[in-house]
Amino acid sequence: MLFRTTALQLLKETVDRRAKNSDVSDALSGWFEGRASLDVLDLHAGTGATLRALAPILAQDQAWTLYARDQAEEALARDHLTRWAPAARATEDGLLIERQGQKIAVRFKMRDVVAAGGALAEPPPSLVVIDEDLMRYPAAVIRKLVAILADRRSVMHARLVYDGRLKLQPHHAADGAFTAALHRQLMRDTGYGEAMGPQAADELSEQLRLSEYSVIEGASPLHLRTAEAPLIRAVQTELAEAQRIVAKGHDKMIDAWLARPRATLEISQTDLVALPP
């Protein structure tokens, strides 16, 4: 994840609204058009951003299960969903949201799909969604997950997944080396196999196609300007810290690179929706 703090994730959520690929979103909502109700599994609770982004374009009655890796993540998502829908009522295992004519039942479940090797805690529902947390998934986990989805013919939607290209301006000659260092960090083995990192969206797409899904992909680039300076600075810092791990003993060079002012940042992201045969 490029933006580690809650404040940065929430700031990114505001710019993600303009980054989303409308063709992919339209394909998703079109597939479920006419459905009065819908069950959704979100593989990464995060701050609840995926629910906030997708619920308004889906059915009137929705039941969401949000996987959280720990109680802190559940509390974070619960808090920000309640802020989004102040009239939300607490239930035994989640929330009941009534907002703009929609009824959304939310339940939280402790589950880390990577630690579980791609297995889910229950059979997948009609729609399964994932955000940039997909980058943590090793290839074997993605293959297992797709096999489970294909068995149930669930729709898969991945949104705003970094695909390995970013551009800081003004350019610096060392930018490529710093980006490569970041990718090595994103693809490291955390005990469950090497993460796919920025190759995750491509791997997911390939496995879905091999399972005879129709995959619709589209760019959802993040264009950051002066107003989003904290996000630009956060990515610079992540790049610098990754380079420190690779280039030991060159802190002065890295500090000089980090001190260079940057006016803009473009982060290439991918949205995809996969429709079952």
Image (cartoon, rainbow, N blue to C red):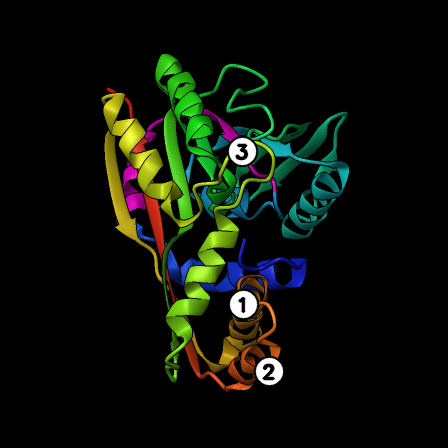
Q: CA distance from mark 2 to mark 3?
A: 40 Å
Query: Which residue does the image show at 38% across and 60% down from the upper left?
Result: 19
On the image, which quarter does residue 183 sit in?
A: bottom left
- In the image, taking residue 173 as reference, residue 73 lies left or right, namely right
Query: Which residue does the image show at 47% across and 33% down from the upper left?
Result: 60
Q: Please state the horizontal and vertical placement of residue 124, each as a whole percent of the image.
A: 48, 19
**Which numbered tag is attached to residue 247?**
1
Quadrant of the image containing the C terminus? top left
Whether residue 94 is visible, yes or no, is: yes
Question: Amino acid under label 1?
Answer: Ala
Task: Bin the neighbour count of mark 3 within 10 Å (Cα to Cα): few under 14, some 14-19, many 20 and up.
Answer: many
Q: CA distance from mark 1 to mark 3?
A: 35 Å
Residue 205 versus residue 173 in the image, above or below = above
Residue 9 versus residue 46 in the image, above or below = below
What is the magenta range? 24-45
**Which numbered tag is attached to residue 252?**
2
Can you tell which of label 1 and label 3 is closer to the viewer?
1
Q: Earlier in the sequence, mark 1 or mark 3?
A: 3
- In the image, taking residue 154 as reference, residue 218 lies left or right, namely left
Q: Please state the horizontal and vertical placement of residue 43, each as a whole percent of the image.
A: 54, 33
Query: Which residue does the image show at 43% across and 64% down from the upper left?
Result: 179
Residue 251 versus residue 1 in the image, above or below = below
In this rendered view, identify the residue nearer to me: 80 or 124. 124
Is 34 part of what is drawn in magenta? yes
Question: Amino acid under label 3?
Answer: Leu
Q: How many marks?
A: 3
Check disc 3 and report the residue beneath it.
Answer: 43
Q: CA distance from mark 1 to mark 2?
A: 11 Å
Question: Amino acid under label 2?
Answer: Lys
